[in-house]
Image (cartoon, grey):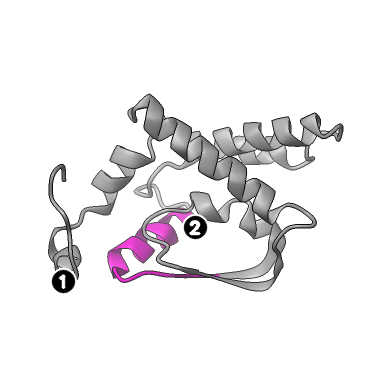
């Protein structure tokens, strides 16, 4: 995967979602910089979708890819989330995760970081930790 720029039709034949996820979204194998970028994104998404932030009935995530991290905070702010992507294989990966398929990518390290960040942000504002935070960390 390193050094190759994928374009259009190449994605359907050459892009490997699992390799992409392991490279950029695995806290256990990613670089410190990649981990910090993911933490930064998770924290900013939490702030974006917190009460008083963005919310509503339907969120359409265009270009979801094989990732779910961007939806963790949004799921509390929207009644329905629609995901879309150019590559059907990416959406199949998200669907596997939703169905708790044993072959699905393991998002639990990112979910734990998200839950910890969420607890810290709420506590930093003087509020109690979210009641559902323990359930999220056990996923």
Q: Is residue 59 above or below residue 67?
A: below
Which mark is on residue 9?
Answer: 1
Q: Nearer the viewer, residue 97 or 9?
A: 9
Q: Mark 1, residues whose alpha carbon is within 10 Å: few (<14), some, or many (≥20)?
A: few
Locate residue 117 relative to residue 85 in the image: left or right: right
Start and end of the magenta stretch?
82-99
Q: Quadrant of residue 62?
A: bottom left
Residue ID at (68%, 40%): 135
Residue 138 visible here: no
Q: Nearer the viewer, residue 94 or 57?
A: 57
**Of helix, strand and loop, which one carries label 2?**
helix
**Of helix, strand and loop, which one carries label 1?**
loop
Q: Is residue 89 above or below residue 111?
A: below
First along the sequence among labels 1 and 2: 1
Residue ID at (45%, 37%): 37
Q: Nearer the viewer, residue 127 or 106?
A: 127
Locate residue 55 relative to residue 109 in the image: left or right: right
The number of numbered discs placed on residues in the rendered structure image is 2
Residue 55 x %, y %: 71, 65
Q: Is residue 90 inside the magenta stretch? A: yes
Q: Mark 2, residues whose alpha carbon is within 10 Å: few (<14), some, or many (≥20)?
A: few
Residue 118 x %, y %: 68, 38
Locate residue 93 relative to residue 62 in the image: left or right: left
Residue, disc 2: 98
Q: Quadrant of residue 2?
A: top left
Quadrant where the C terminus sits is top right
Q: Quadrant of residue 86?
A: bottom left
């Amino acid at each position: 995967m390193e050094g190759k720029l994928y374009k259009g039709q190449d994605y359907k034949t050459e892009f490997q979602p699992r390799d992409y996820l392991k490279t950029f979204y695995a806290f256990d194998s990613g670089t410190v910089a990649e981990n910090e970028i993911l933490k930064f994104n998770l924290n900013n998404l939490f702030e974006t979708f917190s009460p008083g932030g963005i919310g509503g009935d339907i969120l359409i995530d265009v270009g979801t890819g094989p990732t779910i991290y961007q939806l963790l905070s949004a799921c509390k702010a929207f009644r329905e989330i629609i995901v879309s992507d150019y590559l059907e294989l990416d959406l199949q990966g998200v669907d596997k995760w939703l169905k708790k398929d044993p072959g699905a990518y393991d998002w639990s390290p990112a979910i734990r970081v998200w839950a910890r960040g969420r607890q810290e942000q709420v506590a930093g504002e003087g509020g109690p930790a979210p009641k559902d935070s323990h359930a999220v960390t056990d996923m």
